[in-house]
Image (cartoon, rainbow, N blue to C red):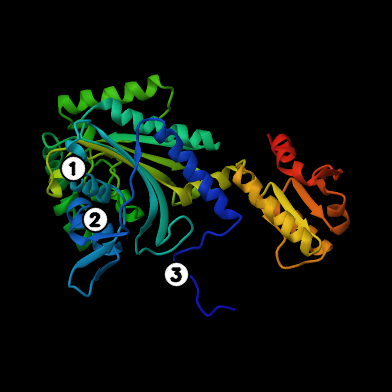
Amino acid sequence: MSTFKAPKGTYDLIPPDSAKYLAVREAIAAPLRNSGYGYIETPGFENVELFARGVGESTDIVTKEMYAFETKGGDWLALRPEGTASVLRAALEANLHKAGNLPVKLWYSGSYYRYERPQKGRYRHFSQVGAEAIGAEDPALDAELIILADQAYRTLGLRDFRILLNSLGDQECRPVYRAALQEFLRGLDLDEDTLRRSEINPLRVLDDKRESVQKQLTGAPLLRDYLCDACKAYHEEVRDLITAAGVAFEDDPKLVRGLDYYTRTTFEFVHDGLGSQSAVGGGGRYDGLSEMIGGPALPSVGWALGVDRTVLALEAEGVELDIPAATSVFAVPLGEEARRVLFAKVTELRKVGIAADFSYGAKGLKGAMKNANRSGARYTIVAGERDLADGVVQLKDMESGEQTAIGVNEIVAELESRLG
């Protein structure tokens, strides 16, 4: 046995389960690619200040959960805890916003890292697929992203998820609400850390999951009662567009999410079959983030959907994904000449796009056929010296058990025909 194990709170993706994760990523990405979003990939680590400024110095992500380290050259870096700040940084650095086609629409997929107490659905290393629309303030963009996420989940077969929707206002109306909320919070029996957080960003207290805090928040002022006319109109248009698309949602006036950069539209996808870790994804508008990290004013909106939690949601609903077998054809040679001939045919099959594998290791017929069964292949090609002397191989249908002799030179054409 190996003396090494995966670090605490992490996991390895291995076959056959890894195929399910790949299928989820593909299903989430597919509607994005069909809607003008281009793929972007950023480094797994960034300057610490990018997240301190963007995500928020008062957030748990920055104060408690970020993996930060000093390099040999004296730079302070952090493993990325989320994707939006990194994608916006990359877009600004590449001047994508100056290409004259706004919004810049990008999607990404990758691993993210947070130091948290490991539990089911909450890991220290996790996978997300995300999308960002950078450089345009338009309710239709907010609605588009919500609709695309809903489409991705429904394509996967998920049904028991809910979309929570709220508006966090903007620089005009939020300060008034902030002051009212701070005044309310000062009258509660909160610990010192929570009181300190309420002075930096009181909206973060609304996101506190502790029951002792949530009980005291009954009667807290709601942001929707403080929205300016412009934010009210913007939010109503988002709601109208989503409704017209047939996407159901629930208004949640207490929804704030866990990052400081959100403005106006905020939303979350939750699944009640996951227990305490019910959020499977979420996002919102972040009109001031570009300026926070040193860029120009670029109103933007985006989301990230958790691959790990989406898989758990599928399992909770008993949804089985239709994942094709990794191998369609398995070749079993009996003898050295057959090894040479069938290996060449496997190579030909692969070149025409047929998933094919080979019995390696000079196994006997019984052992090789066990491998063929385990591979999930629909067809097995078996050949020995007598077959080759007759210029044929034996093609076995693994579902029906039917076996037929076909010419060596007809293998590729025959399998192309049978596999469509």
Is residue 187 among what the camera can see? no
* Pointer 2 with pointer 1, Cβ within 8 A: no
Question: What amino acid does circle 3 point to?
Answer: Lys
**Image marks 3 and 2: residues in contact by CB distance under 8 Å:** no
Between discs 2 and 1, the one toward the N terminus: 2
Residue denoted by label 1: 95
Q: Which amino acid does label 1 sit on?
A: Asn
Count of marks, rendered view = 3
**Which image quadrant is residue 18 in?**
bottom right
The answer to which of 184 and 420 lies nearer the viewer is 420
Say which residue appears at 25% left-offset and 59% top-offset: 46
In this view, the mark in front (3 or 2): 3
Q: Position of residue 188 (x, y in %)?
A: 21, 52
The percent position of residue 111, horizontal first and vertical second, equals: 39, 56
Sooner in the amino-acid sequence: mark 3 or mark 2:
3
Sequence-first disc among 3 and 1: 3
Report the residue that reaches farthest toward the top. Answer: 244
Q: How crowded is mark 3: few (under 14 residues within 10 Å), some or many (20 or more)?
A: few
Describe residue 131's horizontal placement relative to residue 195 as left or right: right
Q: Mark 2 points at which residue?
A: 59
Relative placement, left or right, of 217 versus 183 is right
Q: Nearer the viewer, mark 2 or mark 1?
A: 1
- Asked if 42 appears above or below 63 in the picture, the reply is above
Q: In this view, does 294 lie above or below 104?
A: below
